[in-house]
Amino acid sequence: MSFYQGLLEAAAKGELVLTVNKRLARHLQQLFAQRMRDRGTTAWQTPAICSLESWLLRCLAELGEDWRLLSPFAAQRLWEEVIEEDLDRCGLRLLQVPAAAKQAAEGHRLLSEYAADLDEYPLTEDHLAFLRWRELYLARRQAGDWIDAVLLPEVICQGLSSGELTAPKAAWLAGFDEVTPRVEQLRQSLSQAGCQLRQLPPAQNPVGERLRLPCADAASEVRQAARWARELLEAGAERIGIVVTDLNLYRLLIERIFREELDPESILGLDDEEERFSLSLGASLAEQGPVTAALELLAAGPSLTLDQLSFLLRSPYLQGSLSEGHNRARLERAVRGLRVDRLSRQRLQALCGQNEKRFAGCASPRFAELLDVLTRGETGSRKCLASDWARQFTQTLQAAGWPGDRPLGSREFQVVKTWQEKALAGLIALDGITGAIDRGTAFSLLRRLATETPFQAEGSASPLQVVGLLEAAGLDFDHLWVMGLSEDCLPAAPRPNPFLPATLQKAFAMPHASAERELDFARQVAGRLFAAAPRIILSHPTQQGDCPLRPSPLVADLPAVETVSLRPSHNPVAVLQAQSAELETLVDQLGPALEPGELVSGGTFILKDQALCPFRAFAHHRLGAKALDSTQLGLDPMTRGTLLHGVLEQFWRLTLSQANLLGLDDQHLESRLAESVDFALQQQFGETAPELSAPLLTIERRRLTDLAREWLVAVECQRTPFEVTALEEPHQETLGGLTINTKVDRIDQLPDGSRVILDYKTGRSELGDLLGERLLEPQLPIYATRAGEGGEGLAAVAFALVRRGNCAMKGVARESGLLPGVAALAGSRPAEQQGIADWGALLIRWRSQLEQLGEAFVAGAAAVDPVDLQKACKFCDLAGFCRIAEAALKDEEEL
């Protein structure tokens, strides 16, 4: 406080104090309040301490001209429009108009502030384009009678000169590392108006100890700083500062690690508790929950993608989220089961009230009302002013029950307030810039406003402040840590404006113009920081990934220390590992047995899962554990396989035998295939078929037709004569006490009366799945063993592998020549390897295996025992449940 003693005394006398930023103004106001309390004063007049920007805006309002001021976003949009207008005139295009507009606006500010022009400099096409844009911008600004941030100081200076503004008798400038031409212009105008203006220069001489601390990487640096800060907080220290050279780069690390170290309980907390530290750089408003929900709701079109629907169903910020939460979860699961990636709002409204089996328990009338609100909000292609769109967006959100049924926490309330006061108000302020626009343009602008508006929750002053280099201007601390002092951050690399000649920027010593300019500025900032506390820790990472980092040349000469005083880490993972009690191991691989007569749905998949892994069968069919269905571009493999099954089933219902197949000419074959494909698509999608795009349906029809034709010509026509006697025949079987319902894909009858059982496969299948120690494909063996141990009347069982360019049959047969590519079982190498002597022995083996699988499932066997990590686990949806990967990793570590 001693450094600001004179400044505080001046404020007590009523003199004006103008600071470089709002943070320093708040800091000085707090010091002033502390000074008055120390003197025993219980009430005092608010001191005239404010940021220079706030004072300029106050003066503009005093002139009655504040209505003319363009907001930063409005000025940015004006630049974008004049650039787009010029590009259209020239027949050119830019990929990033907003980025070009920002650079152009900055170039305009630099030229205006430094009173520079480009007449004496050689100009490139980019420079000439910028001059055209600037001329258009100034013309539009003048036509609209607007003021922007560049013109604001000039307007205030004119008001002081004309006497419309009364200059204060005395004023101070505080926290300015350098006096820019803009500040110098104001200083001269104030002096000419009779104001005694003085400047408090920033302290530049180190007042205490400086310690340089190399850290392994940025994460280690942040964690050590957090532990250092916690030690000071626990000791009751006040005014602790952590200055970060690149706060954008470090923000996520700081938010996570500081919360772990300073307030680990808050990681599990669900309420808005006060933070134990203040971070000067807030996250984007669009990233906050209520605003994210608002934007997603307003972005919903006539149809919703699965991701959009999932978000809206789960969001707590929409009407009915509490009363219909359970039903909405069921609705999402049911919709995912449709295996389409997009549904119309009308179709979704119908599903919200469906009572069919698939949608039982999914009734969500309030969500249906929300969808109806979106439908009523559709406006076609009409154009309105931005303010009209802001009003309509607000009405839509209110009708949808935003921001939800539950009471808002403190942080959420501030988010909603910021949305209304900055995002929506910012959109309204664009009326004069954009004129009448369509809804899509208005929403795009609103989303940009929310994305570019930072949000920082308000709260009581924290003794720990985490700030950036510029935010720290003028601040002093009792304890200070400066992090990120690597050579690429301080000084920063030069970044001259691309729309101004580099020689001009160097001649006027404009910000970021050259390495020399950056070095001079870095020295000023470092001098100010090194004098901001009696003891300062200066840290820098020594590694970033595989790249070694060197310290900033401004601190490289300081002696390095290995460590500083730190509190033990509160990292939750480390704490749990250090404090974990000795655990008792209990191997529980047996669940409750099935009750006599208890039925379980799942059919042959129960036995298949039991063979792949007992836990998989128990979790899927006893616990009902299942991952949510997901969609992908186009149709997923399961849906495509189901469609092919449907096509071949319908084809053979119409054709009946190989003789009839061979009797079809090309035209009739194509006609029957087309009929079968249409039938399969209707059976699979029903009313959801219109949700599929016409091109996708066309592609799928062609794929199914070509694949089915290839299968019929390459395999079915080459077989010995047969008749199809059963298709998708249902059957109930009891195996080892387990009763299951199942269907066989197809049964053919050969001329001698023997039967062939086929199972369609569109993926890969191996003969070992039928002949291995574990029976991984039980469906064929179930039907094969129905004829008894001798297998009378059964000639072969096989997988019908229907794959483009690789159609074939793979299985086992009594004798060779019955099926293409399927050899006789007896004497074959696979049979000899498994010790199977003949056809009868195989059927006995299968029956035994099936009985064992049924008995194990009925008994509740639930061991995590996959037959093979590739076969059982690669595509299993229970990996996060059984945690097989963690067990495998632990085994590797023990080795």
Image: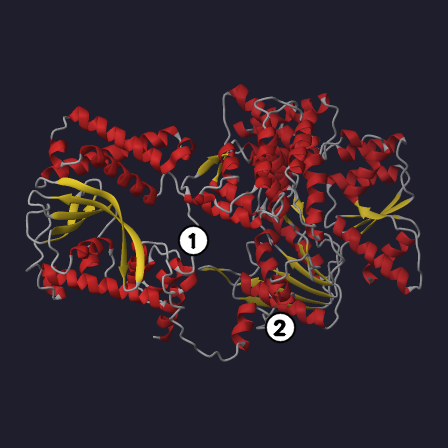
Front residue of 830/471: it is 830
Left or right: 784 with respect to 277?
Answer: left
**Residue at 49%, 34% in the rendered image:** 347
Q: Of the residues under marks 1 and 2, which one precedes in the sequence? A: 2
**Residue at 73%, 64% in the rendered image:** 533
Decide: marks 1, 2 in contact (CB < 8 A)?
no
Q: On the image, which quarter does residue 622 sit in?
A: bottom left
The spot of residue 745 in percent (x, y) is: 24, 45
Q: On the image, which quarter does residue 736 sit in?
A: bottom left
- The quarter in which the C terminus is drawn is bottom left
Q: Residues within 10 Å of mark 1 (few under 14, many from 20)?
A: few
Residue 773 seen by the camera = no
The amino acid type of the residue labelled 2 equals Val
Front residue of 731/233: it is 731
Q: CA distance from mark 1 to mark 2?
A: 48 Å
Q: Which residue is mark 1?
A: 627
Q: Residues within 10 Å of mark 2 (few under 14, many from 20)?
A: few
Q: Residue furthest top?
A: 89
Q: Which residue is mark 2?
A: 564
Front residue of 857/280: it is 857
Q: On the image, which quarter does residue 572 sit in?
A: bottom right
Front residue of 56/792: it is 792
Left or right: 714 with respect to 525?
Answer: left
Left or right: 537 with respect to 587?
Answer: right
- The quarter in which the N terminus is drawn is bottom right
Residue 103 seen by the camera = yes
> Which label was assigned to residue 212?
none
The spot of residue 775 in percent (x, y) is: 23, 60
SS class of the residue under badge 1? Answer: loop
The amino acid type of the residue labelled 1 equals Ala
The spot of residue 156 in percent (x, y) is: 82, 34
**Scheme of colours in the image:** secondary structure
